[in-house]
Image: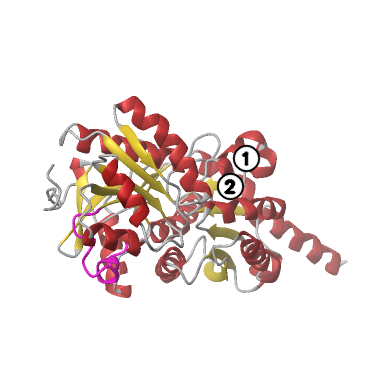
Amino acid sequence: MRKKIFIILAVGLVFSFGFSLESYAQQKVIRWGVTASLQREAGIGSKNATEIAAQEINAAGGILGHQIEVFYADDEANPEKGITAVKKLIFQDNVDFITGGWLSGVGLAQADHIFNAKKLWFSVGPATPKLASMVKENYAKAKYFFRVGCVNSDWFAHDMALFAEEFFMKELGLTKVALLPESSVWAREMEAYLKKDLAVRGLKIVYTDVFDPKRTDFSPQFSQIRAKGAEILMMIQASSPGVPLTKQWAATKLPVHLMGYSLASQVTDFWDKTGGACEYEFTQLINGSRAPITLKTIPFFDKYVKTYGISPTYTAFGQYDALYLLKAAAEEAKSLDTEVLIKTLEKTHFAGVAGVISFTSDHDLRYGKDGKKPAWVQWQKGKHEVIFPKVWSTGKYIPPPWVKK
């Protein structure tokens, strides 16, 4: 009889806390699973920031008395490897929560496996709007997804167009854009969005080319950009190393302002990788910078740099916030039950290191005043200076000396 009572109580614990019985038996541990491209900038940032957050939270008593144990799986920026990675976390490591990610194609491949396992997914990397669309189309199945890191690709394409209008067009009088997106899911989504949004704002795309992320020679594209009279070169790249495009822009003194999204350019070691060729380049930091975004931002940034010697990637900001978001939601709900946490997260308004985290009805991250907003920085003398929005500004714009206007 006692054995039956124990089994009933044990099963009750699984449902009550929303994580595995094995986790609970091991001294009340929360098993936190991170899927990431661990050999690439995004994955390195994810792991580094997770380690900082887990150490801090554990030192302060954990989450509802539970210590955090972290498990990693390398998705290698490949959809098939991503499925293997997430299965490892679910079935081998028996994690209670899933987080991480980078490329949208990988996240889309992993989604069904996470949903079928009914694991809360604190997504920090994939920017495709399609993941939130899954929640909208089939809430019962996909409600476990919450976009915690950057806003979706539509929103940061919107922000890119807004910056082009407010800064380049209104302040510098420039309107002709060359668009260079890499060949990836989210970059093509951004390309489609920008083609509509830039036109509405009065900017004209005079040249477009979708390039292979492995490309190292941009001479054909640059020749066309010169011929078309472009004034702004808008890049969209994450899988690409970023270095070839930037070095060739500076070496050839291509007479355009270089701006856009480059994952590699977000990290301070990009200066060394390019030999300083990134001087004057504009980079969109889609999820945090060393700016007074919230009271937590600069302390986190400085601790990360002191610990690892480089600046945090957007995924690092997201990973750090993801663990603290779980802590805040669990403490507000006084529960680790999955269903209770979902309802709590849907109403959350959490000030993280990268801005305010709050969600739309489809669990997408809000953009703007009640959510997150990217920062635009320019490389100056080996470091990022925030130029836009002006409320976060840390420096003044310096034009490339070979660009007339």
In the displayed structure, 71 sits above or below 99; it is below
| Amino acid beneath label 2 | Phe
- Label 1 element class: helix
Asked whether the viewer can see residue 285, the reply is: no
Q: Main secondary structure of the magenta part?
A: loop
Relative side of 271 to 124, left or right: left
Q: Which residue is mark 2?
A: 145
Q: Which residue corresponds to the image point at 31% horizontal and 31% vertical from the top-left?
A: 204
Instruction: State which quarter of the image contains the N terminus.
Output: bottom right
Q: Earlier in the sequence, mark 1 or mark 2?
A: 1
Q: Which residue is mark 1?
A: 134
Residue 238 covered by magenta stretch = no
Please state which of the two labelled residues, at mark 1 or mark 2, is closer to the viewer. 1
Instruction: State which quarter of the image contains the C terminus.
Output: top left
Mark 1 crowdedness (10 Å alpha carbons): few <14, some 14-19, many ≥20: many
Q: Which residue corresponds to the image point at 47% horizontal and 72% vertical from the top-left?
A: 39
Q: Which residues are magenta?
A: 266-281
Percent x, y for residue 217? Answer: 37, 61
Q: Which residue corresponds to the image point at 49% horizontal and 70% vertical from the top-left?
A: 38
In the displayed structure, 34 sits above or below 153; it is below
In the displayed structure, 94 sits above or below 199; it is below
142 or 181: which is nearer to us?
A: 181
315 or 292: which is nearer to us?
A: 315
- Residue at the right extreme, as displayed: 1
Percent x, y for residue 125? Answer: 48, 54
